[in-house]
Image (cartoon, helix red, strand yellow):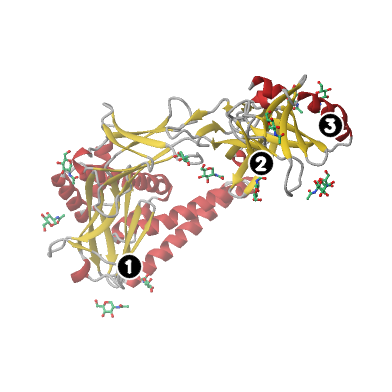
């Protein structure tokens, strides 16, 4: 067998020496590309006509017999076989198979066909490395906005592969980022939301065209831009306390943890930041804390607190209205967190009724201040207690306001009063004009203004009261100014004292106070002065 294999050699050498050299120099050498571990078929020429005896050689340093269509000559290696009695089929290709093959065909004459076989290998593996990025539980990478990210991709193949990076921000639109043979790396210095997307490294074997890709999804996260904000509201559905924490501008959404302070008992944990607090946990003065945490935000998170407070009320304890006139009761809520709902109720002879806006009652609210205007006052219908009630999930506070309805004062005496006051004003001005130099008189413009203002206030505040008081004012005009201001002060303070008493729930004191107010105005003043003396 070994002798048989060697037998054709002299003719081969002849063929190779003459014909093959001619074919190669003419550029007629066929090139066939195979892949490692794959199979390949080398054709002997291109004729599909009936063939003569075909013998294949490998042209290394010297021709080596591979196989022949003469069935009495067995193939050198079992990986080689003939197809259609002419083509050389090679299985399980290895890199060592690369080289030049020669097909010798013996028909009327002898012809040689050289075939060059190239074996490509890989790429089998693509190594992708993206630095300064964390990874999510599902494997997706993320990087903080503004930071830098370094990309590198490495792959090996024979021949060395072409390595390219592609970036896809939105489906269907890919952009070539960088390419280099065997290694491609680049750094993005300032990551922005526009650079979020899929990064694909593709390694291509330029010989076989085989390509391998690795895609990494990279998210560009940004922390919230401002500080978190805590607020407490009354839930519309159940009138329970609802805590809301907002921390805007971040991507993705932050997580919020609401706790009770002190103690840190957990109220809830969510990405919404909204928690409803069971009424049993709501106490006046209690503080709730929201801790926001963001994946690329501050390591310790950021927090805000909200304190829950019941409302406090401020109002005049009594008001007077003339029959057929209008009167406005004012109720001022302060300190309520969450904001209080303000209601007006009647408490005359009938049980408590919530007043609804109507032709008779006008209710307006600005912020936490509510006004109840009673139109066309009538003694039978409208005189009595009015209750202003402020409530939030922490507490309910009420203040009572007594409305007394009076017949209008005699018009003649009113007119008389106004005229006498006017005269008083004129007299004062004239006195001042005479007393001071003209220069000073000019300066006195403001003084005069003040006087007028005081006179107006006097009319306003005293209009409900008996003419007796006004006559007194007539008597001593010098003291009038200072005393009037004092009276105003006293009025204010007196009211505040009484309201405080109310809010503190001291109803007895309230009733007595109101009684005093009704009965005698001067008595009320002295009361108030007494109130002030200890402080
Ligand atoms: C066969 O090869 C010859 C040269 O060797 C060429 O001239 C001819 O066109 C080829 N025929 C076909 C069908 O490829
Ligand atoms: C075939 O082998 C001979 C002898 O070593 C060499 O001179 C020739 O260049 C080879 N031909 C090819 C196509 O490799
Ligand atoms: C086939 O090979 C045998 C043994 O080498 C040889 O005797 C025979 O002549 C060959 N046949 C042809 C057609 O070349
Ligand atoms: C073998 O011959 C058949 C029929 O002529 C043809 O279809 C097939 O392509 C040939 N195979 C090769 C490898 O040339
Ligand atoms: C080859 O020889 C045969 C006879 O054996 C003949 O008929 C044929 O024409 C010849 N072909 C060529 C190309 O010379
Ligand atoms: C991984 O999770 C992130 C955030 O939940 C999401 O945006 C991304 O699409 C996920 N990736 C995969 C491959 O599921
Ligand atoms: C990135 O790839 C994931 C799956 O591999 C796909 O769900 C997502 O839509 C891709 N994103 C873009 C921007 O192409
Ligand atoms: C390609 O990568 C090699 C190896 O890192 C490097 O030396 C070469 O400069 C790179 N070429 C280009 C065009 O980036
Ligand atoms: C309030 O919490 C208590 C226990 O903490 C629970 O038993 C009760 O059902 C809760 N009430 C509501 C209205 O959620
Ligand atoms: C009372 O209010 C009504 C409606 O605003 C108005 O028409 C009327 O003139 C007011 N009466 C007095 C005395 O101010
Ligand atoms: C309001 O009415 C309730 C019951 O109807 C009574 O207990 C309460 O004393 C009343 N308040 C006032 C200020 O009249
Ligand atoms: C005011 O009330 C009285 C009875 O209370 C009624 O007769 C009168 O028409 C009312 N006036 C207006 C303007 O509503």
Instruction: Residue 363: give x, y in percent of width and height.
Output: 33, 63
Does the rendering let one see residue 182?
Answer: no
Q: Which mark is residue 85?
A: 2
- Which of marks 1 and 3 precedes in the sequence? 3
Depth order, front residue of 306/478:
306
**Residue at image point 27% right, 61% down:** 320
Q: What element does badge 2 sit on?
A: loop
Question: Which is nearer the eye, 345 or 532?
Answer: 345
Name the residue rendered at 19%, 48% in the picture: 513
Q: Residue at x 68, y 39 (%)?
A: 87
Q: CB at mark 1 closer than 8 A to ligand 10?
A: yes
> Which dot, 3 or 1, sits closer to the camera?
3
**Measured from the top left, where is residue 452 in percent x and y?**
49, 55
Q: Is residue 244 above or below residue 453?
A: above
Residue 377 visible to an observer of this rendering: yes
Q: Give residue 39's quadrant in the image.
A: top right
On whether ligand 2 comes within 8 Å of the CB at mark 3, the answer is yes
Query: Cα distance, mark 3 to mark 2?
Result: 21 Å
Residue 87 is left or right of residue 265, and the answer is right
Query: What residue sits right under mark 3 in the picture?
Result: 20
Nearer to us of marks 1 and 2 is 2
Query: Which mark is nearer the camera, 3 or 2?
Result: 2
Q: Which residue is mark 1?
A: 326
Q: Position of residue 444 (x, y in %)?
A: 58, 48
What is the secondary structure assignment of the residue under circle 1? Answer: loop
Question: How far apart are the two marked residues, 3 and 1, measured between alpha carbons?
Answer: 123 Å
Image quadrant occupied by the C terminus? top left
Name the image quarter holding the N terminus.
Answer: top right
């Amino acid at each position: 067998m070994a002798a048989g294999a060697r037998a054709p050699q002299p003719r081969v050498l002849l063929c190779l020496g003459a014909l093959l050299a001619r074919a190669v120099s003419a550029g007629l050498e066929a090139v066939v590309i195979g892949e490692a571990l794959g199979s390949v078929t080398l054709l002997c020429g291109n004729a599909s006509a009936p063939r003569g005896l075909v013998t294949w050689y490998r042209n290394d340093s010297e021709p080596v017999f591979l196989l022949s269509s003469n069935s009495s000559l067995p193939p050198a290696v079992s990986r080689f076989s003939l197809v259609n009695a002419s083509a050389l089929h090679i299985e399980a290709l290895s890199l060592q198979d690369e080289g030049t093959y020669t097909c010798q065909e013996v028909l009327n004459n002898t012809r040689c066909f050289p075939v060059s076989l190239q074996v490509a290998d890989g790429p089998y593996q693509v190594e992708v490395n993206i630095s300064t990025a964390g990874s999510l539980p599902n494997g997706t990478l993320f990087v903080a906005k503004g930071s830098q990210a370094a990309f590198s991709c490495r792959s090996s193949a024979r021949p060395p592969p072409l390595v390219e990076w592609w970036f896809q921000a939105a489906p269907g639109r890919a952009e070539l980022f960088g390419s280099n043979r065997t290694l491609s790396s680049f750094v993005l210095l300032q990551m922005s939301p526009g650079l979020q997307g899929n990064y694909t490294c593709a390694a291509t074997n330029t010989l076989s065209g085989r390509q391998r890709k690795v895609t990494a999804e990279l998210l560009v996260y940004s922390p919230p831009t401002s500080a978190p904000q805590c607020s407490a509201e009354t839930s519309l559905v159940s009138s329970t306390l609802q805590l809301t924490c907002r921390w805007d501008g971040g991507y993705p959404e932050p997580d919020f943890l609401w706790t009770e302070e002190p103690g840190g008992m957990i109220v809830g944990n969510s990405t919404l930041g909204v928690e409803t607090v069971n009424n049993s946990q709501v106490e006046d003065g209690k503080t709730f804390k929201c801790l926001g945490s963001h994946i690329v935000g501050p390591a310790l998170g950021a927090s805000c607190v909200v304190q829950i407070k019941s409302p406090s009320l401020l109002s005049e304890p009594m008001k007077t209205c003339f029959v057929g006139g209008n009167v406005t009761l004012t109720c001022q809520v302060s300190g309520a967190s969450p904001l209080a709902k303000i209601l007006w109720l009647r408490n005359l002879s009938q049980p408590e009724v919530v007043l609804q806006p109507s032709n008779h009652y006008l209710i307006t609210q600005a912020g936490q201040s509510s006004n109840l205007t009673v139109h066309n006052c009538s003694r039978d219908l409208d005189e009595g207690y009015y209750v202003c009630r402020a409530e939030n999930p922490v507490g309910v506070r009420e203040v009572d306001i007594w409305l007394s309805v009076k017949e209008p004062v005699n018009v003649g005496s009113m007119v008389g009063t106004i005229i006498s006051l006017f005269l008083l004003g004129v007299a004062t001005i004239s006195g001042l004009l005479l007393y001071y130099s003209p220069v000073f008189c000019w300066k006195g413009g403001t003084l005069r203004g003040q006087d007028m203002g005081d006179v107006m206030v006097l009319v306003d505040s005293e209009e409900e009261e008996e003419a007796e008081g006004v006559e007194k004012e007539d008597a001593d005009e010098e003291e009038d100014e200072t005393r009037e201001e004092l009276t105003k002060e006293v009025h204010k303070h007196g009211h505040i004292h009484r309201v405080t008493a109310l809010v503190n729930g001291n109803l007895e004191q309230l009733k007595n106070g109101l009684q005093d107010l009704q009965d005698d105005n001067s008595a009320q003043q002295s009361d108030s002065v007494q109130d002030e003396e200890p402080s």
